[in-house]
Amino acid sequence: MINPEEFYDCLIEHQLDFFTGVPDSLLKEFCSCVKENTSTERYIIAANEGNAIALGSGYHIATGKFGVVYMQNSGIGNAINPLLSLADEEVYQIPMLLIIGLRGEPGVQDEPQHVKQGKLTLPLLEVLGITYYIVDDNYKENIAYCYEYMKRAHKPIALVIRKDTFSTYRSYTKEISDLELSREAVLENIITNLTDDDFIISTTGKTSREVFELREKYNMGHGNDFLTVGSMGHASSLALGISLFSDKNVICVDGDGAFIMHMGGLGVAVQNANANFKYILINNGCHESVGGQETIGFEIDVKQILIGLGFNKVFEIKSRKDLVENIKYLTSREKLAMVIYTNDRSRNDLGRPTTTPIENKESFTLKLRGV
């Protein structure tokens, strides 16, 4: 395994000292090292991977140096447009070093939403014309080559990170949240206060895992939940598409990272939604499921944003008392939103859905349509 601090030091030795991207669980040790050793203006967690490519491009234009852009391979889709229409050697010729976590690597057990992406990651980089190295013990030679390549070719190049590439990095000091509510407690309150005509669209990450386990806990069945295990940032658009063509109450349960990633989609959803569309944003201020890196969720006025997007009513909830008093409105026929502030703690023994995505979709579809 590679010591993340030595990997970081090697980047710095090659003047690769500006970092931006979207966190990934395979890169969490590296990202922790970058956070602790890099000034805030040189370490920016982007809203999405395309934004990170643009940030890295701006850095190069301003300085002539090469930015480091990190992402999970699932984020390559977000990055394709600016890679081909901004950074490409036939457009602006902007070099940068991509560091890509290889989820779903063929032959390595992973979750179903990562399997196809894992198969296609390397072929996709080849189609995009991006040279890559799979990082191993020769990483120092790889980094040196990448630096010279960017100077010579004026285009992006990638380092691909496999599972367990990095050893554990000593934990940096992180402020402990003193918020009363946990996400699982919030979800438990929501689920136990809904009716059989209320349907949940839950975002990717631990949210959907907790929804599944809570249904198991109460022997409720899973027909009322669509677990969006991938497609980060798109749960609200999915919920809109369902709610427009159903008379059921459709409740999107989102996270702050997903909300920030594709906020425009939520704006379109609100403007086109009927009264059966509800939106719950569980805001813990971090990308918890991939290492706990911060989002801007606690730095922006989420309530005012939701009001500005067009919700008829927005509740801001920071305590169990607030939650208990306002949870009843979820079953009303009014286009409303709740932003619920929670701590960033979850159970260490949290499981994963035991049904496949196809089984989940089929049971949800049957229940929604009343078949």
Image: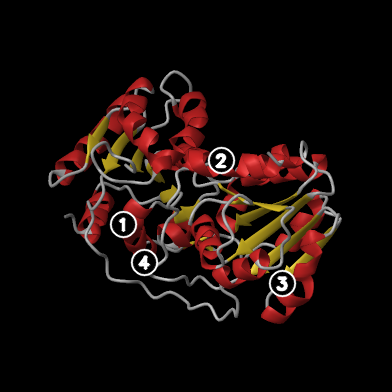
Task: Name the residue tied to disc 1.
Answer: 30
Could you tell me how far apart the alpha carbons at marks 2 and 1 are, in whole angstroms?
36 Å
Q: Is residue 152 left or right of residue 60?
A: left
Q: Amino acid at mark 1?
A: Phe
Q: Amino acid at mark 3?
A: Ile
Discs 4/3, front: 3
Judge the density around disc 2: few (<14), some (14-19), many (≥20) Cα neighbours within 10 Å. Answer: some
Judge the density around disc 4: few (<14), some (14-19), many (≥20) Cα neighbours within 10 Å. Answer: some
Discs 4/2, front: 2
Task: Name the residue tied to disc 2.
Answer: 361
Could you tell me how far apart the alpha carbons at marks 4 and 2 are, in whole angstroms?
42 Å
Task: Name the residue tied to disc 4.
Answer: 36
Could you tell me how far apart the alpha carbons at marks 3 and 1 are, in whole angstroms?
34 Å
Q: Residue at x 67, y 79 (%)?
A: 320
- 3 or 1: tag closer to the N-terminus: 1
Discs 2/3, front: 2
Could you say where residue 197 lies in the image, as x and y percent from the top left?
A: 74, 53
Q: Residue at x 48, y 21 (%)?
A: 91
- 2 or 1: tag closer to the N-terminus: 1
Task: Name the residue tied to disc 3.
Answer: 317
**Kind of element beneath mark 3:** strand
**Kind of element beneath mark 1:** helix
Q: Amino acid at mark 2?
A: Lys
- 4 or 3: tag closer to the N-terminus: 4
